């Protein structure tokens, strides 16, 4: 089956190439056959533990011609589907759960209408690394700089999981040059702005804007959280920095790294580097100097600081801070690349390839050209013809992404099942 | 004899102790003479507390009767604290002294008492067991400043990270599974911060609960350091109704006037008598009761230079509109209030004002007295189920923040747990707080040397 898929794909990739003009035609089909409204509702309703949780959620649509509408809200998955079919948004954002239904906010006093809860979110964007990657800049990404996203996911996910104890974390490809994280634990959704901002600061190691050259300064001793991050990055750092980025490969690049060192070390290294031939040798030399027994204290953490400055996750604190900050929804289509914002499998982060993410044109092509999957579940009685058509996605490249989402939903469901049980016990309901 | 009033503040969920001025002054003075926390300092502290008959060792033993007395006290305590907020400096000083005192007491408590204290105050912190401490030794030392030397003797507590946001933000502690591992000394800072926050808020909220007529008088007094007779009576009796004792009242007025042009001697001759009279200590000894709305509206019409009376009755419509605007009422709300004013229903206008400023509908009380206004307001701000809002089954909670310790976000507490989100009205409150402290609130007490009655 898989081979068949790949075969077809190779043959007709040209037919399935994407260009923005196609969005208008393809999006209706995408929303009809691919966007997982049912699962979406399952996620955002969180088991109905809190009343009207889905109904009080704000969504925003970006329509054709960049028309932006906020405060959309829906009674049910069906209603959402209907409205989306009507509007055909080019982009959908998910906002906060408010005190009242956002589309009825005019019925209450302005000061009474407030954002109350939202997932804790993170947005990692490759452009924030432009000063430390040499292969691309701005909206471009390639296989040589994508490892930065892998680092980011690993490091931040570990901290969220082990330091903060968050269990339900959904990582999503942003469709072009970054990744988003949605932390969905109940405790996360209830966090105040101050708490969100504190978490974001805890996770920030890169400090300093355009004006500062050295953006990482480690204290001594190094905080356990940073030590864990270094451990995670250590294995792949050399492949990334020395091979893919070759970040000590020429004089210009070397100067960038030298700028991060204390004066005395810099002088020594500059002269050492000039006699060395490649990145690997330079890096080894740096490490042996800073870790030598007689190295001054000031030097001790330099190579770690360099590692962190080049690879540690850079997140936009403002995105994480606000309780009512809107963030692009998973399973949206990126209007410029056509790629679907798919969930990323945490068990296979290294294998995730942004260039292999299905595009909307590819999916629509697959729908028409791939043979039906003979799926027991898909064989339904004709009255359920509708349902059967919906399972069409399973034969396409989107199936894998949906599976990742399903596994995330399963864990989430287990958490609210426990809650509902406890609460019905309290109320003596059976 | 030293003024030895003992005020205890309980913002409905916690049992913090606050001492009055002279004790604080003493704390400050030996804070200046001795290295803080040195042995001499601690001895002095102990002596001072002993003098004040305060349970310096074991604040745990609290009887129901104590609680009741404390509850009654707390309103008058607001007045006291109002007094200290003359300026940002003074406020800081006040908080610093209280904080030092608190810190001392907290650190002196035996660990069993500390545990009890934490429980009493709904602070769900547990100290870590020795084996966990050993297991995490490296991490704890590497994450906590100065811990290398102190490690063996320090107790660590596990605190939900949301209760230690500043330490989390600066990566200054060890974090695991959502719990911050805090050394004992830092725990004091955390608790103190909560304490300070609730104190600050309580201070701002006190004036927030004043009806418009008393707010006018309050600010007029603050600005001009003087009130004419009618104003002194109306406002003075209101404060009396809040629990201000005669001694406190005398000091209050004396000090405020002293900041103007009436020195204490002049005050004694010209004003003190009238105040004592109002408390029923002179002349025919009628213990005057605070004026009701009816009385304020109908009698004693204010003339030029007066600030008493009922704003809804006695203030020019245009000026009144302006004032309502400055209190952040919307134009539709202002119109509603003005309708009542036009119809000469002044108490209803005030009640509407109450409803708008407290974000409730259909106040369940019929307003007839300024002190009633204050109490209803306090009730509401403390989370009482005073006026239920009509809504479509949405999350119910008082929209104006109550005077309680800031809640840690314990999800276990309720499914519709208090939002830890700063609501629009909480933002407003913060701004009011800033305004209060920027401009000073009432005035300050000077060292009281008043005899106890």
Image (spheres, rainbow, N blue to C red):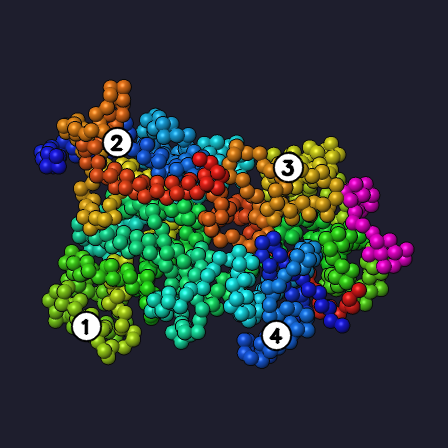
* Mark 3, residue position: B334
Q: Same chain for the residues at labels 3 and 1, yes or no?
A: no
Question: Which quadrant does the C terminus of chain B fall into?
Answer: bottom right
- Asked whether residue A84 is in view, the answer is yes
Dot 4 crowding, Cα within 10 Å, few <14, some 14–19, many 20+:
many
Chain that bears disc 4: B
Q: Which residues are magenta?
A: B279-305
**Residue B32 occupies which quadrant of the picture?**
bottom right
From the image, which quarter does the N terminus of chain B lie in? bottom right
Query: Where B378 falls versus B267 (above or below)?
Result: above
- Give the SS element for disc 4: helix
Q: Earlier in the sequence, mark 1 or mark 2?
A: 2
Res B390 → quadrant: top right
Q: What residue is disc 1 on?
A: A288
Q: At 32% from the left edge and 59% from the top edge, which residue is drawn?
A: A206
Dots 1 and 2 on the same chain: yes
């Amino acid at each position: 089956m898989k081979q068949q898929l790949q075969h077809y794909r190779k043959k007709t990739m040209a037919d399935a190439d994407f260009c923005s003009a196609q969005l208008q035609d393809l999006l209706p089909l995408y929303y009809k056959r691919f966007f997982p409204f049912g699962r979406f509702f399952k996620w955002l309703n969180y088991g109905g533990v809190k009343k009207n949780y889905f109904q009080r959620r704000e969504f925003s649509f970006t329509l054709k011609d960049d028309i932006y509408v906020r405060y959309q809200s829906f009674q049910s998955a069906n209603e959402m589907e209907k409205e989306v079919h009507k509007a055909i948004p080019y982009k959908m954002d998910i906002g906060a759960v408010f005190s009242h239904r956002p589309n009825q906010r005019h019925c209450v006093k302005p000061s009474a209408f407030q954002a109350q809860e939202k997932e804790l979110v993170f947005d990692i964007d490759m452009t924030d690394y432009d000063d430390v990657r040499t292969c691309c800049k701005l909206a471009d990404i390639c296989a040589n700089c994508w490892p930065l996203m892998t680092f980011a996911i690993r490091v931040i996910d570990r901290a969220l999981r082990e330091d903060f104890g968050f269990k339900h974390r959904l990582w999503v490809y942003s469709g072009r040059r970054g990744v988003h994280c949605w932390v969905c634990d109940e405790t996360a959704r209830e966090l105040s702005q101050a708490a969100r901002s504190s978490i974001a600061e805890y996770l920030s190691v890169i400090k300093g804007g355009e004006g500062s050259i050295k953006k990482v300064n480690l204290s001594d001793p190094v905080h356990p959280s940073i030590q864990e991050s270094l451990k995670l990055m250590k294995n792949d750092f050399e492949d990334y920095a020395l091979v893919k980025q070759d970040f000590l490969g020429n004089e210009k690049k070397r100067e960038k790294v030298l700028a991060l060192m204390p004066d005395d070390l810099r002088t020594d290294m500059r002269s050492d580097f000039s006699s060395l031939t490649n990145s690997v040798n330079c890096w080894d030399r740096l490490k042996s100097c800073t870790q030598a027994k007689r190295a001054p204290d000031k030097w001790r953490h330099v190579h770690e600081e360099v590692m962190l400055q080049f690879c540690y996750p850079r997140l936009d604190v403002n995105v994480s801070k606000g309780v009512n900050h809107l963030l692009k929804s998973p399973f949206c289509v990126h209007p410029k690349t056509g790629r679907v914002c798919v969930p990323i499998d945490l068990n296979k982060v290294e294998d995730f390839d942004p260039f292999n993410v299905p595009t909307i044109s590819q999916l629509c092509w697959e729908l028409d050209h791939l043979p039906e999957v003979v799926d027991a579940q898909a064989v339904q009685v004709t009255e359920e013809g509708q349902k059967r058509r919906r399972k069409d996605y399973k034969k396409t490249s989107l199936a894998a992404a949906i599976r990742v989402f399903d596994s995330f939903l399963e864990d989430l469901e287990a958490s609210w099942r426990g809650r509902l049980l406890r609460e019905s016990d309290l109320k003596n309901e059976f | 004899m030293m003024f030895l009033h003992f005020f205890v503040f309980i913002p409905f969920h916690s049992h913090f102790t606050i001492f009055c001025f002279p004790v604080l002054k003493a704390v400050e003075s030996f804070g200046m003479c001795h290295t803080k926390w040195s042995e001499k300092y601690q001895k002095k502290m102990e002596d001072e507390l002993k003098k004040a008959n305060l349970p310096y060792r074991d604040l745990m033993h609290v009887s129901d009767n104590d609680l009741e007395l404390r509850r009654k006290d707390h309103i008058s305590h607001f007045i006291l604290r109002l007094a200290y907020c003359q300026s940002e400096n003074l406020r800081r000083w006040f908080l610093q002294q209280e904080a030092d005192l608190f810190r001392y007491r907290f650190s002196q408590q035996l660990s069993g008492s500390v545990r009890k204290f934490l429980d009493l105050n709904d602070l769900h912190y547990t100290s870590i067991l020795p084996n966990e401490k050993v297991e995490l030794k490296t991490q704890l030392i590497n994450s906590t400043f100065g811990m290398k030397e102190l490690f063996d003797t320090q107790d660590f507590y596990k605190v939900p990270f949301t209760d230690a946001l500043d330490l989390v933000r600066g990566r200054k502690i060890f974090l695991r599974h959502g719990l911050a591992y805090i050394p004992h000394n830092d725990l004091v800072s955390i608790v103190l911060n909560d304490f300070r926050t609730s104190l600050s808020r309580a201070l701002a909220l006190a004036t927030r609960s004043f009806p418009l007529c008393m707010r006018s008088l309050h600010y007029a007094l603050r600005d001009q350091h003087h009130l004419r007779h009618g104003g002194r009576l109306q406002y003075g009796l209101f404060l009396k109704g809040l629990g201000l004792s005669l001694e406190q009242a005398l000091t209050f007025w004396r000090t405020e006037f002293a900041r103007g042009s009436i020195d204490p001697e002049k005050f004694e001759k010209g004003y003190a008598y009238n105040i004592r009279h109002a408390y029923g200590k002179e002349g025919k000894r009628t213990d005057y009761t605070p004026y009701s709305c009816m009385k304020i509206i109908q009698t004693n019409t204010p003339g030029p230079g007066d600030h008493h009376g009922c704003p809804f009755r006695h203030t020019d419509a245009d000026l009144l509109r302006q004032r309502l605007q400055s209190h952040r009422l919307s134009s539709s709300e202002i119109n509603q209030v003005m309708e009542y004013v036009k119809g000469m229903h002044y108490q209803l206008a005030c009640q509407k004002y109450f409803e708008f400023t407290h974000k409730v509908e259909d106040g369940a009380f019929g307003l007839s007295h300024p002190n009633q206004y204050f109490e209803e307001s306090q009730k509401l701000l403390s989370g009482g189920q005073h006026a239920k809002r009509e809504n479509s089954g949405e999350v119910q909670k008082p929209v104006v923040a109550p005077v309680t310790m800031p809640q840690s976000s314990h999800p276990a507490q309720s499914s519709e747990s208090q939002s830890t989100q700063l609501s629009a009205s909480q933002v407003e409150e913060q701004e009011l707080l800033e305004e209060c402290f920027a401009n000073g609130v009432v005035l300050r007490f000077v060292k009281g040397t008043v005899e106890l009655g």
